[in-house]
Amino acid sequence: MGRPTTVIPPGKRLLPAVVAVTLLLPLLFARTAPAADLSVSSKTFLRYYERELAGGNKDTYAPLYEYLSADATNLGGKPLAFHFYGWGRLDLGDASGSGKESGDVGSAYLEYLHPQGNAQMKLGRFFLTEGAAMETLDGAFVKATSSVGLGVSLYGGAPVEQSILNGTSTGSSLYGGRVFFAKAGFAEIGASYLVENGSFQGGEDREEVGGDLWLRVAPPVELTARATYNRSASEMASQRYAVRIVPGATVDISAGYESYTYKGLFQSTLNPAFVPPSVDNNDDVQTIFGIVDWAFVPGWTLEVGGKIIRHEKSDPGDANRGEVGVRYAYNDKKDVAGFSAAFVSADQAKNEYQEYRGFASYSPSKLRLTLDALTQQYKEAPIPGVGKKNQYQVVATAGYQLLASLQLSGNLTYTQSPNFQEDWAGLVRVNYDFATSTGGKK
Amino acid sequence: MMRRAYAMNIVGAALLALLFGCSSVSQTPSVPPKHPEDLPQGRVDCLECHQDVSTGALKPYSMARHSRVFIDSHGTYARQGQNLCASCHAPAFCQTCHARKEEMKPDTKMGDRPDRRAPHRGDYLVTHRIDGRLDPGSCFRCHGNKMDTRCKQCHQ
C-alpha cells in the first residue's frame, strides 16, 4: 500500500481561525493584565543519534525541540484563564521525521471557571475527557451542576486527529454531552452520548453511548464502572468495572474486570494497525486485573500487579502478566529508587517475556543525577530474521539548577536490542519555568 | 435520518437541562483553579493535608492519592471531571502523553524523572509487537486516531 492521501475535512479549515481567535482573546483583557497570574514553561531539547541505513550509509540526526506551555489565570481579576501548549522541531542534521521541521499546537483555549458549582466553559483547542469522550477538540465545552446535584455537559467542534489509514480521513465534526447526578462523597453516575461525523469502518459515523459510575459503598470502599456502546457497529465497545479499597493512608487495593470488542472499539480508528488484516475484527478481549500499593514502612512502597488476558480467538491466544516492585523515596521525597520485575506467560511462546528494571536518583543541592536500567528477555526472537532475544537499555542523566527558574541537564542512553546491535544517543535539556505567583504543581 | 433525530432529541434535552442547571447552579464553592500553595516534589498524597471531600471532584481526597492504583485508573476519574486535576496540573501535563502528534516518547522527554510512570520505556518498538498482539485496546486509546507519526513507518 502506498502512502495515504491527506484529506483536509471542512472542520479542519476552522483550525487557523480558532487558534488565531483564541490567541487574540486574552488581548481583550490587556488593560487588566496586571491582575493576571502568569506561568510559562519552556523545555528545549537537543537530541543526537545516528542510524545505519541499508547499503552502509549512516544518517546523523540532531533534532532541536521546543515545548512551550503558558497559563494565564485570573485574567482581569475574573475566573478566566488562557492556556497554551505546543511544540516545534527543527533538524540541525538529517531529517528525523517527515521533513526537517515539524510541530503542533496541543491546546490553546480560553477557560471560564465559575466560582460555584464547578460550572465551566472552554473555547478553543483543548483536551477533553468527559464520559465516552477522550478527545482533543477545536470547539467549545460547557458544564454545570445544579443545586440538587444534577448536571449536564455539552461539547462540539472539529476533532483534532491524525489519519494514516488509506481512504479514511479524520472526522469533520464531533459533538456530544453527558448528563450526570453527583452526591458529594457518595456517588456520581453519568450517561453520555457522542457523535463524530466521518466515514469510518463500514462507511459509518462514530456514534457512542456511554455510562459511568463512581460509588462509595463504605468509607474505604468504592466501586467504579464505565461502559461504551458503539451504535455504528452495534457492538459493546468497552466495559470496565473495578472495586478499590483504601483502608488508610498506606494501603490502596484495586481489582476489576475489563473487556472490549475489536469491532466496537476500533470502528473509528484512523490507524491501519487496528483494521484487518492487522487484527481479526471478530476478536474480543476480557481481562481481570488486580493492583496492590502498600507503603509498608515510611518511604518504602511495595507495588504488586497482575492481569489475566483472555482472547475470544485462539490467535493471538491468552496471557497472564505479573509484576512486583519496590520503591524507596528519600531526601525529602526529592529522590526515589526502585526495582521491579515483570513476567508475561502466554499460550504462545512468541508472546512470553520477562522484564527487570532498576532506577535511582540523587539530588544534593542544585545537582541532580539519575540512573535507569531496563532489560527485557524474550522467549522467542521477537523480530523475524533477527536472532537476538533480549534488550538492554541504560539511561544516565545529570542536571544542574543554574537559577531558581532555569535548569540544564543531559541524558546519555545506551541501547542493545533486536533493532540495535549497539546504540548511543544523547540529549541536552534546558528547562525554564517562570511564574508570577506561587501555587500549583504544573 | 432516525439517528440524526435521536441525536437532536438528546442535544435538545441536554440544552433544556443546561438551562435548568444555569438557573440554579450549585452554590458549592468550585475547586480553586490553582492549588493555593506550592506542592513538594514527588508523588502527591492529598491526605497529608486534606481529610474531607473535595468540592471540585465531589469525591474524597483519598480517591486522588497518587498511588499506582490511581495512576493506572486515572482515566476513569478524569472522565467524570478534570477540575481537581487542573488545580495542580496544567493542561500541558496531560498532553505530555495524550497528544495528537508527538515525536518524542514520554520517557525520553522525562529522562531525568525515572520515578514517573512513563509508558514505552526501552526500545519499545520491539516489545510493542507482543503487547500489541495481546492487548491492542491499551494501544488504541492513544494511537487509534492520534500520535501515528511513528506508526506509519511500518503500518501502511
Image: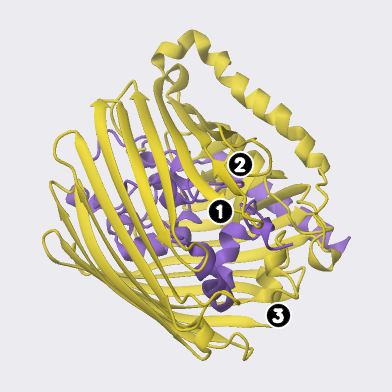
Please rate how many residues cluster around mark 2, counting C-alpha atoms within 10 Å: few if below 14, some from 14 to 19, many from 20.
many
Look at 70% across and 61% down and name the residue there.
A271
Q: Residue furthest right?
A: B1
Please rate how many residues cluster around mark 1, counting C-alpha atoms within 10 Å: few if below 14, some from 14 to 19, many from 20.
many
What shade has chain B been given? Answer: purple
Q: Is residue A305 visible?
A: no
> Which chain has been coloured yellow in this picture?
A
* Cα distance between the residues tagged 3 and 2: 36 Å
Q: Which mark is drawn over residue A141? A: 2
Could you tell which of marks 2 and 1 lies nearer the N-terminus?
1
Depth check, mark 3 against mark 2: the one in front is 3
Q: Which mark is drawn over residue A130? A: 1
Q: Is residue A394 visible?
A: yes
Q: Which x, y percent locates residue A262?
A: 67, 75
Q: Are marks 1 and 3 on the same chain?
A: yes
Q: Which x, y percent locates residue A10?
A: 83, 40
Q: Is residue B56 left or right of residue A221?
A: right
Q: How many marks?
A: 3
